[in-house]
Image (cartoon, rainbow, N blue to C red):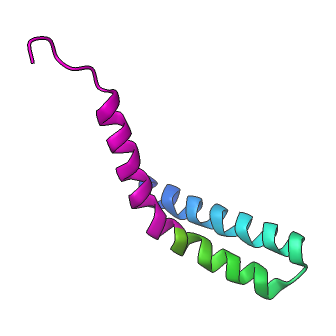
Amino acid sequence: MVTAAKTTSQILVHMGVAFATMYVVTGSVAFGGLAAVLEPVCNVIVMPMHERLWARISARLQPVPAGA
């Protein structure tokens, strides 16, 4: 239950920041709403690529075991 509440809170904060930033920059509620919707969609698309990139970086930085 706490995990779901935390996740929901994070999503709402992201959407709120995206809306507020775009509204301040453009003065448009429509563009603010568009940014609030597109930001989570872009995160869903980009985050798996980001995780794979960091997994590859971490694998390269692992020390080679002795005798290998």
Comparing 41 with 62, the one in front is 62
Is 60 drawn above or below residue 29 in the view shown? above
In this picture, residue 44 sits left or right of residue 10? left
Residue that extends furthest to the bottom in the rendered view of this protein = 30
Q: Give the left or right position of residue 67, taking residue 63 as reference.
A: left
The picture quadrant where one finds residue 62 is top left
Residue located at (21% from left, 20% from top): 64
Q: Is residue 40 above or below residue 7?
A: below
Position in image of residue 38 (x %, y %): 60, 77
Q: Position of residue 39 (x, y in %)?
A: 61, 71
The picture places residue 1, in percent across and down from the top left corner, at 41, 58
Residue 36: quadrant of the picture: bottom right
Magenta stretch contains residue 36: no
User: From which residue to which does the magenta span run?
Assistant: 43-68
Q: Quadrant of the C terminus?
A: top left
Q: 11 or 25, which lies in front?
A: 25
Residue for point 78% across, 88% down = 30
Note whether 54 is above or below 66 in the view shown.
below
